[in-house]
Amino acid sequence: MTLPLIIYRSLRQHALSTVITAGSIALACGLLMCVWMVKTQSQTAFTQTTTGFDAVLGPRGSKLQIVLNAIFHLEASPGNLAYADYEMIKRHPAVKTAIPIAVGDNVRGYRLVGTLPELFAGVEYSRGKTYHVQPDGKIFRADQREALVGAFAAERLGLKVGSTFRPFHGLAFDPKNEHAESYVVTGLLEQTNTPADRVIWIPLRGLQTMSGHDPKAATDVSAVLLQLRAPSAGFMLDTMINKQGNKLTFAYPVGAIIAELFSKISWFDQVLALVAYLVALVAAGSVLASIYNSMSARGRDLAILRALGARRRTIFGAVLAEAACIGALGAVAGFAIYFGLFVGVARVVRVQTGVVLDLSARHPVLWICPVAMIGLCALGGIVPALKAYRTPVAESLAPVS
Amino acid sequence: MLGVTDLKKSFVSPDGERVTIVNVPSFTLAAGEQVALRGESGSGKTTFLNLIAGILAADAGRVTIDGAEMTALSEPHRDQLRAAKLGYIFQSFNLLQGYTVLENVVLGMSFGPRGADRAHARKMLERVGLAHRLDHFPGQLSSGQQQRVAVARALVNRPKLVLADEPTGNLDHKHAHESLELIGEVCKEHDAALLLVSHNEETLAHFKKGRDFKELNRAGTP
């Protein structure tokens, strides 16, 4: 009971410096955990997001650009494919499913994607999960100006079943580029937590023949999403299309291509982690400075405790434990900062990419970081604890008669 | 109870000269005995008490308390002996300002063999008339009340020996008188020996047995 009392009272007596120091530790701890979790979560989320397809066939160009465009609905399409190319790959015996998509228009910043109604009739976007239309809605018909809206896009655009809208030309919203055609919303998709949530889906033919589009490209598609019958088929098609051909690009496997992107930007993670480590070191230093600076004011109290029979090692332990407690307070508050930051980052990632980061996900960093921070703070407490250890009792108990 | 033999302590002055402050060939105090030591400011009285309490290490000599030789013990054992057998009342009370009255008294017994006993600490504070001030902080009390907290803290651990260093130095005449009565009574109740040092004649007159520290201390004597 004595040691907790001494620690508690000391923290209370130096409440302002305790709060400021614990705050800086909380910031360091929260930042470290957030950087780590966003990094690992986004890496996992992006590399596992395939929307149910093994590969993407696109025009000759960057595989990464093709995947980002066709799966994540980011980036511009590197070009078009002839409809004949779609039919060729569709008929290939190694291909189980082939769904063409066409892009190039938006609705107030949300991407319009032309495709076939079959995409929503049984294709698994994730293991065991298929697209579902919310009650009272239905999938668009291939020959009508009808639209199926992703859950997030519907929420943001305020679209409901029966709503109508006019598309805008291009991937970026420009009010001057409004198309003449009007589409009616026939259904809203249930939330999938994939980039599909941010998309407004219309019939392939509708996007291909939108007013103002090049009539020569009226049958072209932007990419073809592919499900293969076996993984070996992917390597066979890779050789056939990428190595032996020079017209198309076969992006396979989707996850590995995104993983390459993360490996290219890993230096950025390292810089962020380095910054977080430095913040942690500064926080530990602030514990040292904060307690050390208060030692002269505490000298008398420590001498009184010694005069009452407290041993040097008790005083040393009390100061060390106080430093660790400041670290623990900071670590606990760090979780609040972590949750706040993570929710903010996750919202931005979802708005920008449709990928959902899971706040409830567990990772060893969520206990390693707080424990390490408490350890660092205890280390920072060693120097002031040594000063406390050496407190001269008689000299500090003035006045002398 | 207390035995002092050839106790010596010197310090190095700012000009580098070694100055002997305490040189007491012999001093004893029986169990339950109450003795006042008269001495002027700067005469080495506090140093003498600190040597007895083991707060300062002696250059030479012996101090025995209840049969244990304080001067032969290592520092941790001196701390242990002090916590177990000694109570110390300081001139400026030396209460911990960030702790409540009750916590101050509880800390007086926390490092001893009996450990913290809040119920006993409460009783001690009731005895000195502060039952209604348990959760107050020292800064919220009068000097007289702070003195009573210091008395309660010194005696809460049932010490064999109580050392009091100018215990009335910060009190007015009325409070000083009351405080000395209280210290004397409580020591008697707990059968603790009391060694009080002061330069104040009124304080010294309060005790039947008084001695002049100058007579005890040969420091400065050729």
Image (cartoon, rainbow, N blue to C red):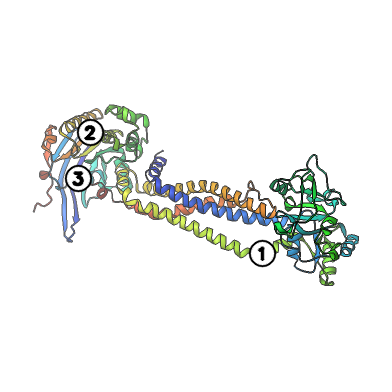
Residue A46, position in %: x, y? 70, 56
Q: Evaluate whether label 1 is on the same chain as label 2.
A: no
Q: Nearer the viewer, mark 1 or mark 3?
A: 1
- The image position of residue B111, as x and y in percent, is 35, 40
Cα separation, mark 1 vs mark 3, equals 72 Å
The chain that hosts pointer 1 is: A
Name the disc covering residue B46, or none: 3
Tag 3's secondary structure? helix
Q: Callout 1: 10 Å neighbours few (<14), some, many (20+)?
A: few
Q: Which residue is found at the position 34% from the left and 46% from the top?
A: A311
**Quadrant location, the N terminus of chain A:** top left
Tell me the tag on residue B144: 2
Between the residue at mark 1 and the residue at mark 2, the CA separation in whole angstroms equals: 74 Å
- Asked if disc 1 and disc 3 are in contact, CB closer than 8 Å, the reply is no
Find the distance from the CA under tag 3 to the CA under tag 2. 22 Å
SS under mark 2: helix
Q: Is residue A110 above or below residue B91?
A: below
Label 3: how many residues lie within 10 Å, few (<14), some (14-19) or many (20+)?
Answer: many
Residue A173 seen: no
Q: Depth check: A168 or A356 in front?
A: A168
The amino acid sitting under disc 3 is Thr
* Residue closest to the far left: B222
Mark linked to residue B133 = none
Front of the two marks 3 and 2? 2
Q: Is residue A87 visible?
A: yes
Tag 1 residue:
A263
- Asked if marks 3 and 2 touch (Cβ < 8 Å), the reply is no
**Do the residues bearing badges 1 and 2 touch, measured as CB atoms within 8 Å?**
no
